[in-house]
């Protein structure tokens, strides 16, 4: 695909975004209308001035742009003294003449619950811009092939969509009762580069693009102690393009289950016939490397589906399921997924499937509040502590508002209130309770300098609507009307939103 005639000057941010979006919609339309098409002339779009300018805008707008890679260059260093255009010119030239070579990523350790550690790979700012430019071109092409049951790190899709689909199929009339909770051992670390490149070649024939993708996969890692490690497998978590590549890789799972669903379980009369003849119906729902398979049948049939998943994972993606974490659970016992607890409970009006915050995620956010109201923070002013706590409370409540969360919100608000009260008491040990009340929390609210402690109980709780395949993205507005059915279009980017609360829900 040829881009517009190259401009003598770099476009402005708004102009660059509009031009890139026009290219993306064309790519997506061609990929959707021609499922067998292989794109053999898209590298020039990666090098296009508008693509690189918009890629810079996306990368610079991320908080991580102030985190340097192995070259110690940050966003501030690039934009200082009008250095942006020379920076982009140099990147564009190196991409076009083939001299571009990504630097190794810098490894950073992020603690997880249970004492485990997650390793992130932090590319250089220059490599992040190049990865974003590559993603802007590849994403609309592969979006045409991705399946509706995949929700993680895709435009227009949210974790709540995955939770709502599970709720839709576990309640009446569907009543899928058995859940296979899938967990792949070290998924991102064990991505087979040969398999991944084969999947990319199914759609991309441009050798320069393929060479660039492989270069990012083989860039290597600089360990925390300073040593270098080659990256023969895996996609480093933290890279801009890693979520897209992971979705391409794991779409093999989606493809298998979607094929079985379409050929053997659709339309509904086939599912009814399968149950009458003693065969299970099952459906995959995936969010990045977290997935569940809903089974309408018996536990023994769920065990058979679990074995089938293990064989597919081993054969097609060269990975293994974790025996300890791949569980089979009944909906009456409940299970945790993406921070939510999903469980069927008995009520006067009959059984009802509820989704609400899990105990682990509640404990995690309470621990964050405890950290910012501990003895070590009494040197801060009240308004400084409120500025730290309020985004945590508001973001957590916004994530879990689409569930039966009202009681949990009230409890969290009560907990945050009393943590702040005791924090004030420790900060002002010589004041009486009455003096503290008059100074800081009169009228039943804690405030200073116009900043009021946020109460999660004020967050409106509502049911998120199941959108199915009718999800609007920037690329498919010609077939899915953004102004159509309720909740079709989200008001924020899923990747950004989930990243802000990921430490609370993982």
Image (cartoon, rainbow, N blue to C red):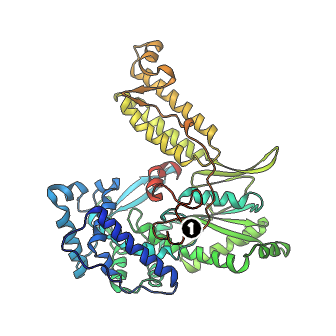
Q: Position of residue 367 (x, y in %)?
A: 50, 39
Measured along the vertical axis of the image, is residue 242 above or below residue 424? below
Is 28 displayed left or right of 309 in the figure? left
- The residue sitting at 48% across, 41% down in the picture is 394
Measured along the vertical axis of the image, is residue 499 above or below residue 326? above
Task: Please identify the quadrant where the N terminus is shown.
Answer: bottom left
Is 430 displayed left or right of 311 in the figure? left
Q: Residue 229 lies in what quarter of the image?
A: bottom left
Counting the numbered discs, the total is: 1
Q: Position of residue 149 (x, y in %)?
A: 60, 68
Viewer-proximal residue, 498 or 253? 498
Q: Position of residue 62 (x, y in %)?
A: 35, 56
Q: Secondary structure at mark 1?
A: loop
- The residue sitting at 56% across, 30% down in the picture is 414
Residue sitting at the far right = 276
Viewer-proximal residue, 166 or 429? 166
- The residue sitting at 48% across, 80% down in the picture is 31
Inspect this view and state whether residue 231 appears: no
Q: Residue 448 lies in what quarter of the image?
A: top left
Measured along the vertical axis of the image, is residue 327 above or below residue 260? above
Q: Position of residue 39 (x, y in %)?
A: 41, 85
Viewer-proximal residue, 21 or 94? 21
Measured along the vertical axis of the image, is residue 448 above or below residue 350? above
Circle 1 packing at 10 Å, graded few (<14), some (14-19), many (20+), is many
Q: Which residue bears the numbered disc 1?
A: 150
Is 181 displayed left or right of 203 in the figure? right
- The residue sitting at 39% across, 33% down in the picture is 385
């Amino acid at each position: 695909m040829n881009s517009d005639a190259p401009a003598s000057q770099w476009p402005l941010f708004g102009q660059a975004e509009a031009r890139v979006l026009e290219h993306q919609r064309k790519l997506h339309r061609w990929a959707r209308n021609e499922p067998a098409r292989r794109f053999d002339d898209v590298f020039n779009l990666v090098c296009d001035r508008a693509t690189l300018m918009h890629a810079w805008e996306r990368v610079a707008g991320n908080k991580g742009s102030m985190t340097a890679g192995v070259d110690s260059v940050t966003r501030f260093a690039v934009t200082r003294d009008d250095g942006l255009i020379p920076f982009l010119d140099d990147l564009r030239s190196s991409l076009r003449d083939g001299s571009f070579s990504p630097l190794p990523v810098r490894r950073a350790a992020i603690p997880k619950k249970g004492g485990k550690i997650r390793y992130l790979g932090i590319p250089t700012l220059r490599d992040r811009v190049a990865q974003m430019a590559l993603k802007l071109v590849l994403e609309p092409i592969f979006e045409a092939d991705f399946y509706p049951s995949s929700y993680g790190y895709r435009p227009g899709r949210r974790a709540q969509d995955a939770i709502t689909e599970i709720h839709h199929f576990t309640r009446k009339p569907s009543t899928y009762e058995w859940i296979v909770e899938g967990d792949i051992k070290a998924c991102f670390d064990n991505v087979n580069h040969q398999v991944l490149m084969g999947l990319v070649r199914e759609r991309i024939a441009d050798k320069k693009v393929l060479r660039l993708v492989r270069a990012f996969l083989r860039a290597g890692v600089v360990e925390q102690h300073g040593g270098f490690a080659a990256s023969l497998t895996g996609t480093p978590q933290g890279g801009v393009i890693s979520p897209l590549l992971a979705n391409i890789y794991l779409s093999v799972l989606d493809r298998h289950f979607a094929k079985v669903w379409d050929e053997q379980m659709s339309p509904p009369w086939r599912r009814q016939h399968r149950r009458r003849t003693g065969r299970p119906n099952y459906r995959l729902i995936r969010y990045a490397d977290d997935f569940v398979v809903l089974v309408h049948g018996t536990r023994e049939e769920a065990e058979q589906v679990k074995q089938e998943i293990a064989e597919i994972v081993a054969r097609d993606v060269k990975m293994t399921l974790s025996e300890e974490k791949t569980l089979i659970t009944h909906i009456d016992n409940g299970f945790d997924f993406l921070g939510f607890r999903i469980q069927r409970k008995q009520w006067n009006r009959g059984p009802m499937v509820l989704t609400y915050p899990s105990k682990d995620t509640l404990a995690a956010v309470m621990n964050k509040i405890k950290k910012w109201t501990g003895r070590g923070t009494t040197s801060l002013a009240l308004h400084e502590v409120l500025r730290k706590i309020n985004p945590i409370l508001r973001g957590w409540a916004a994530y879990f508002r689409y569930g039966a969360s009202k009681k949990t919100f009230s409890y969290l608000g009560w907990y945050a209130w009393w943590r702040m009260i005791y924090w004030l008491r420790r900060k002002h040990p010589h004041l009486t309770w009455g003096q503290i009340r008059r100074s800081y929390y009169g009228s039943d609210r804690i405030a200073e300098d116009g900043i009021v402690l946020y109460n999660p109980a004020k967050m409106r709780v509502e049911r998120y609507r199941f959108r199915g395949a009718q999800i609007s993205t920037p690329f498919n507005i010609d077939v899915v009307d953004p102004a159509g059915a309720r909740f079709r279009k989200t008001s924020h980017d899923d990747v950004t939103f989930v990243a802000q609360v990921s430490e609370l829900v993982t």
